[in-house]
Image (spheres, rainbow, N blue to C red):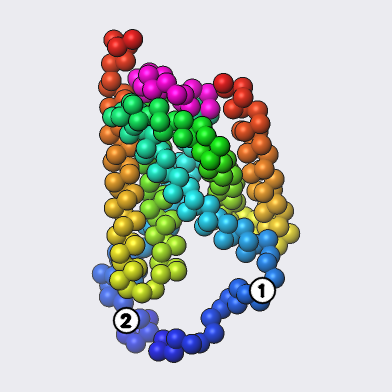
Amino acid sequence: MSNDNRPTSPHLSIYRPQISSVLSILHRMTGLALFAGTALMVTWLWSAAYAPSFYATFYSGLASSLGKLCLFGWTCAFYYHLGNGIRHLFWDIGKGFTLPVMNRSGWAVIVFMLLMTAATWGFIIPAAQ
Amino acid sequence: MTATSNLRTELAKVKGLGASRHAVGHWWLQRVTAVALIPLSLWFLVSLLTALLSPNVVKVAQWFSSPVHTILMALLLVATFIHAKLGVQVVIEDYVHKPFAKYFLLLANTFICFGFATVCILAVLKLHFLDVGASL
């Protein structure tokens, strides 16, 4: 532990990205993004309960292009983390560990995220308004 | 089993808590909250899209007048912030190795998660007990 210059593994800079490793780090990144997004939840609930005048400002911020872009990103992160989280739960009970199944479930998570995000933004939101 | 093959005390073996003193508690709670969050988060998203995403704060308060909505929302918040706290903790432990930065971030993570959860739950309770029917 005394030599700080030892090469460390995995050598990310020379590894060819694989679906297993890319989806793994995406799970962490989307988890962190969702955590950052909980600040929106706090602001939304707090302003609704204690600062109704700020609620209107906050809501128009969310409805702006930048706000919508953030919410769109958050939607992608949510569906990705949900789908891949369910994939993790299957691994936890010992299912789906072979490489072909892992590759297929990985792509299934990506398709799930794309379809659900598209459905949420393309269909449900206009219908709800 | 000889004395040299196993240095663990009888008490440690009975407790079964391992070197970290909390056994699989972290791992298990992460899974319990994950399972709880599948229906709760989807329910919340549907609620947002169908009723809650409104510029009218009165509509939000009316939605929270339902005890079922309030209970599910409180459960969602508790599960979310426990899950977030555990998840972010592991990320910090994996990537931050300088002691000061590591413990600073671990403490900040804990305080932010408990703080956010408390603020959100208080707001939800206030919205629930707000008599919006009377003010309309």
Residue at position x 39%, y 44% from top? A39
Q: Is residue A23 magenta?
A: no
Q: Chain of mark 1?
A: A
Give the position of the N terminus of chain B as an image quadrant: bottom left
Q: Residues within 10 Å of mark 2 (few under 14, many from 20)?
A: few
Q: Residues within 10 Å of mark 1 (few under 14, many from 20)?
A: few
The residue labelled by disc 1 is A15
Residues flagged by tags 2 and 1 on a common chain: no
Q: Position of residue A81 (x, y in %)?
A: 55, 48
The amino acid beneath tag 2 is Leu
The amino acid beneath tag 1 is Tyr
Look at the picture and state if A31 lies above or below A25: above
Whole-angstrom CA distance, mark 2 to mark 1, is: 41 Å
**Could you tell me which secondary element the residue under label 1 belongs to?**
loop
Quarter of the rendering containing residue B14: bottom left
Q: Position of residue B50 (x, y in %)?
A: 53, 23
Of residues B62 and B89, which is closer to you in this image? Answer: B62
The residue labelled by disc 2 is B7
Q: Position of residue B108 (x, y in %)?
A: 31, 57
Quarter of the rendering containing residue A119: top right
Q: Is residue B84 visible?
A: yes
Residue at position x 27%, y 34% from top? B122
Magenta part of the chain: B49-65
Looking at the rendered structure, which numbered label has been put on residue A72? none
Residue at position x 53%, y 40% from top? A66
Of residues A51 and B34, which is closer to you in this image? Answer: A51
